[in-house]
């Protein structure tokens, strides 16, 4: 008869990893890259299965969802096809693991989360989450549905204190761990050390890395347009005043939810004023990381644009379009002088923040090693962690 330790090891052998994948987003793809490495390194997993279409940076046998279910509008046919694919993957999964991101904000009546919950309970297999945020819930119905699912989970490691508070208020009875964002382990997952803090060499033009947000579903159209105009004008003014080059990072290339349009608008605005490079999600996580390390300062709307900057040792400013952005800045100890408002009111505010970064080279107060340690806790604190 197998002992408890054997059962624990078996549960971690072939996890089905689920999340907000398949949306052509570098941040979500980075979760997959980290998880593919970390599940083997920390849990001894043999063959993680990702409920995702093919990803540039992962072996072909890791991603098992047909990309056709992500093509065009996400209508009923694609949704049913995706759900059936996920259901078939559960038969070979030793557990279900939510891997990274804001996956617990919204839940409709036909969500796959209910399917995962029913399956794991019926099959006696664990359901867990690492590196996730809980809330803020989109509406009361989502909150009720999500709370029902969350209460069936065995282990949740969250990336921010706000999520800890939400879970305690919800009466979560499983193992709750305060950890960190999975992207803190990206250098290790890519076989690298933390790079030194970026400082341009004498005679080298500094490079500004920028991520913009193509669609903000939580802002009125007029507010979002004003913010876009101010950011692009501010970056253009800064480039005209300083000898700075620009890399435009298109973190999300999805045709509906992505950043292609606004990123092209920025590229055109600074074209001819400096050297402009464009790196997109189609280039992959590794290429994006490499390009980020070549920057010396950053201005970001994408949360993981800021996290990539921070982990790469690149001082940055983040426009906090959602509460999760403020939570990150609070956690990191972002210097007050480098914090921008949710909607910068004038291009001069953007120029001032970027000039302050260039002048002071200030990084957040939290050591990057500590950030990586918190990311590691997602795995080392779990009951499936390989110990001795």
Image (tube, rainbow, N blue to C red):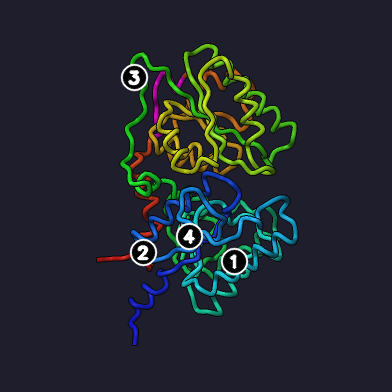
Q: Position of residue 345 (x, y in %)?
A: 64, 23
Q: Position of residue 254 (x, y in %)?
A: 64, 44
Q: Is residue 287 magenta?
A: no
Front label number (4 vs 1)? 4
C-alpha gap between disc 4 and disc 1: 13 Å
Give the left or right position of residue 83, taking residue 8 as reference: right
10 Å crowding of disc 3: few (<14), some (14-19), many (20+): few
Secondary element type, mark 3: loop
C-alpha gap between disc 2 and disc 1: 23 Å
Identify the residue at image location x=53%, y=33%. Answer: 249
Query: In terms of sequence position, does the residue under pointer 2 or pointer 3 come before the other?
Result: 2
- Residue 86 got which mark? 1
Query: In terms of sequence position, does the residue under pointer 2 or pointer 1 come before the other?
Result: 2
Query: In terms of sequence position, does the residue under pointer 4 or pointer 1 come before the other?
Result: 4
Determine if residue 248 is in view.
Answer: yes
- Quarter assignment of residue 344: top right
């Amino acid at each position: 008869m197998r002992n408890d330790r054997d059962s624990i090891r078996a549960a971690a052998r072939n996890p089905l990893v689920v999340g907000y994948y398949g949306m052509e987003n570098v941040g979500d793809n980075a979760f997959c890259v980290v998880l593919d490495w970390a599940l083997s390194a920390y849990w001894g997993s043999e063959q993680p299965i990702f409920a995702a279409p093919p990803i540039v940076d992962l072996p072909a046998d890791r991603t098992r969802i047909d990309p056709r279910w992500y093509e065009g509008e996400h209508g009923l046919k694609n949704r049913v096809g995706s759900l059936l694919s996920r259901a078939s993957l559960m038969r070979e999964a030793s557990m279900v693991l939510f891997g990274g991101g804001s996956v617990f904000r919204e839940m409709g009546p036909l969500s796959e989360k209910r399917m995962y919950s029913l399956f794991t309970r019926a099959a006696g297999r664990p359901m867990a989450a690492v590196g996730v945020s809980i809330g803020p819930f989109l509406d009361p119905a989502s909150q009720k549905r999500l709370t029902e699912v969350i209460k069936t989970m065995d282990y949740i490691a969250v990336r921010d204190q706000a999520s800890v508070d939400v879970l305690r208020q919800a009466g979560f009875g499983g193992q709750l761990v305060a950890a960190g964002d999975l992207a803190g382990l990206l250098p290790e997952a890519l076989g690298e050390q933390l790079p030194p803090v970026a400082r341009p060499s004498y005679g080298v033009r500094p490079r500004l890395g920028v991520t913009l947000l193509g669609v903000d579903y939580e802002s009125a159209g007029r507010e979002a347009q004003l913010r876009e105009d101010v950011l692009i004008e501010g970056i253009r003014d800064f480039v005209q005043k300083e000898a700075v080059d620009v890399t435009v990072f298109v973190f999300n290339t999805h045709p509906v939810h992505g950043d292609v349009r606004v990123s092209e608008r920025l590229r055109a605005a600074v074209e001819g004023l400096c050297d402009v490079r464009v790196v997109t999600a189609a280039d992959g996580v590794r290429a994006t990381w490499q390009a980020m390390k070549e920057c010396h300062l950053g201005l970001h709307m994408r949360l993981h644009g800021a996290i990539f900057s921070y982990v790469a040792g690149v001082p940055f400013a983040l426009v906090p379009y959602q509460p999760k952005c403020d939570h990150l800045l609070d956690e990191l100890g972002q210097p007050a002088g480098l914090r921008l408002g949710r909607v910068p009111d004038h291009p001069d505010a953007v120029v001032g923040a970027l000039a302050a970064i260039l002048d002071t080279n200030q990084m957040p107060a939290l050591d990057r090693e500590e950030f990586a340690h918190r990311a590691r806790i997602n795995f080392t604190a779990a009951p499936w962690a390989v110990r001795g």
